[in-house]
Image (cartoon, helix red, strand yellow):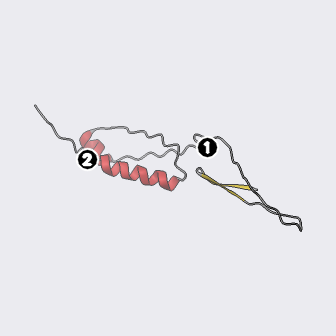
């Protein structure tokens, strides 16, 4: 039995239905990454910064994320980090 526990791992349960002991010397797992199988799309906006600085769109393609919570944390971090421009003018 194989339980897909996330995009980065799989949990295998091997059950012995006989009365004899078994020994496994090797387990090889091959497959295709799940990137794109179930895309998570989050849209966040900061209306105050849009009013002051205009609409800017940032789109991130992060296929290695394994949960919506992880995607939510990254989205909130990027929104907080980019809501106020921090650049400076070197010359006029």
* Marks 2/1: CA–CA distance: 35 Å
Q: Secondary structure at mark 1?
A: loop
Q: How far across and how far down the image is residue 5, in percent? A: 63, 56
On the picture, is 39 further left or further right than 81?
A: right
| Direction right: furthest residue | 19
In the rendered image, which quarter is residue 53 located in?
top left
Q: How far across and how far down the image is residue 59, in percent? A: 42, 39
Among numbered discs 2 and 1, the one appearing first in the sequence? 1
Mark toward the viewer: 2 or 1: 1
Between residue 24 and residue 31, name the one nearer to us: 24
Q: Secondary structure at mark 2?
A: loop
Please tell me whether residue 36 is drawn above or below residue 26 in the rendered image: above
Label 2: few (<14), some or many (≥20) within 10 Å? few
Which quadrant: the C terminus? top left
| Direction top: furthest residue | 92
Q: Which residue is disc 1 drawn over?
A: 34
**Residue 84, numbered circle:** 2
Q: How far across and how far down the image is residue 66, in percent? A: 55, 51
On the picture, is 89 further left or further right than 38?
A: left
In the rendered image, which quarter is residue 37 located in?
top right
Label 1: few (<14), some or many (≥20) within 10 Å? some
Q: Residue at x 33, y 38 (%)?
A: 56
């Amino acid at each position: 039995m194989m339980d897909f526990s996330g995009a980065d791992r799989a949990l295998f349960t091997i059950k012995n239905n006989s009365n004899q002991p078994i020994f496994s010397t090797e387990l090889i797992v091959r497959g295709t990454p799940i990137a794109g199988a179930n895309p998570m799309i989050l849209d966040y906006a900061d209306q105050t910064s849009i009013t002051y600085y205009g609409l800017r769109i940032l789109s991130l393609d992060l296929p290695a994320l394994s949960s919506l919570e992880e995607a939510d944390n990254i989205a909130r971090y990027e929104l907080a980090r980019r809501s106020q421009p921090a650049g400076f003018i070197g010359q006029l």
